[in-house]
Amino acid sequence: MKTLGQFIIEKQAEYPNAKGELSGILSSIRLVAKVIHRDINKAGLTNNIIGNSGVENVQGEAQMKLDLFAHNTMKQALIAREEVAGFASEEEEHFVAFDTERGRNAKYVILTDPLDGSSNIDVNVAVGTIFSIYRRVSPIGTPVTLEDFLQPGNRQVAAGYIVYGSSTMLVYTTGNGVNGFTYDPSLGVFCLSHENIQIPTDGKIYSINEGQYLKFPMGVKKYIKYCQEEDKQTNRPYTSRYIGSLVSDFHRNMLKGGIYIYPSATNYPKGKLRLLYEGNPMAFLAEQAGGIASDGYQRILDIQPSELHQRIPLFIGSKEMVKKAQDFMREFG
């Protein structure tokens, strides 16, 4: 069985300009995945990482203890490697410039949602970590600037997620397909388990929080009703599956075929998910696996970010399902 370390070294030749830094960053993320995996698996036995921290993040949302733990773990792992020039997190209002000599001379910045779906940890439901890597645009040798982080998703060098579920998996892309690695805790290594993942062109699963139905745009309401209608020719009705953790819902739909929707709503007129920490990395993965990621009208990866914590609607998954949802959005709004 090929390990993640072996796979990274093999693929290093595909990025001659990276000179090993990208491989080093991925190795840091591998370490983060192991640390968070370890602590999540004993979450029910300790009060240190379970429950509410009593602090709110920049979006005014209650931070779970695990949010802060994952955020600090990721931040410290990247600082220690000194191959990253800067770091931005959903859990921190401003980006962090690694203002050391090596940091100023590093080529890459990382954006992350350290713990997606963290409210689920109290009830033993799968959660995840999302990450996105860009080549900086500011001059090498200087501290990073906001411009380095506000790049459209089509400039991503790499992106991925770790899902902590019945097994822990690390799934990532560097623009040459999507590969998944399952963690073997007995050996302490990630092994290649899902090579060249392809999202089925069509599917039978739709994932959306239907409890918010009355607040959705008409196009989304019409699409939900379409999913629920009986039609043998198109294998409808579809199956509704919603975990409430983007990583978990996306991971299932990527393997089985389906669509995940987090639309705008009357209480979230611009959408709720963050473009930089969730939308762009998941869109990069979706497209590399043969799927589509849209805000209902346009490609996610073409959106020019205007702020670190910008929100967007997200329609992502199997190509035919996303296209159909977009048809409803364009017709009904």
Image (spheres, rainbow, N blue to C red):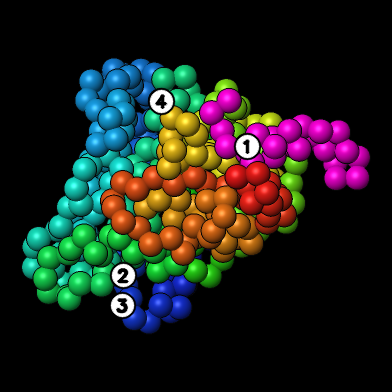
Q: Please name the residue that numbered disc 3 is placed on.
A: 19
- Crowding near pointer 4: few (<14 within 10 Å), some, many (20+)? many
* Residue at left offset 30%, top offset 60%: 150
Label 1 near label 2: C-beta < 8 Å? no
In the image, taking residue 111 as reference, residue 80 lies left or right, namely left
Q: Secondary structure at mark 3?
A: loop
Label 1 near label 3: C-beta < 8 Å? no
* Residue at left offset 20%, top offset 52%: 95
Q: Nearer the viewer, mark 3 or mark 2?
A: 2
Q: Nearer the viewer, residue 31 or 297?
A: 297
Query: Residue 262 at what x, y percent from top left?
Result: 53, 39
Q: Please name the residue that numbered disc 4 is placed on.
A: 119
Query: Residue 47 at what x, y percent from top left?
Result: 29, 17
- The CA distance from mark 4 to mark 1 is 29 Å
Figure quadrant of the N terminus: bottom right
Query: Residue 266 at what x, y percent from top left?
Result: 47, 31
> Is residue 98 something that shows in the picture?
yes
Q: Please name the residue that numbered disc 2 is placed on.
A: 135
Q: Can residue 23 be found in the magenta stretch?
A: no
Q: Nearer the viewer, mark 3 or mark 4?
A: 4
Say whether disc 3 or disc 1 marks the residue closer to the N-terminus.
3
Q: Secondary structure at mark 4?
A: helix
Q: Nearer the viewer, residue 30 or 191?
A: 30
Magenta-drawn stretch, dominant element (helix, strand or loop):
helix
In the image, taking residue 215 as reference, residue 134 lies left or right, namely left
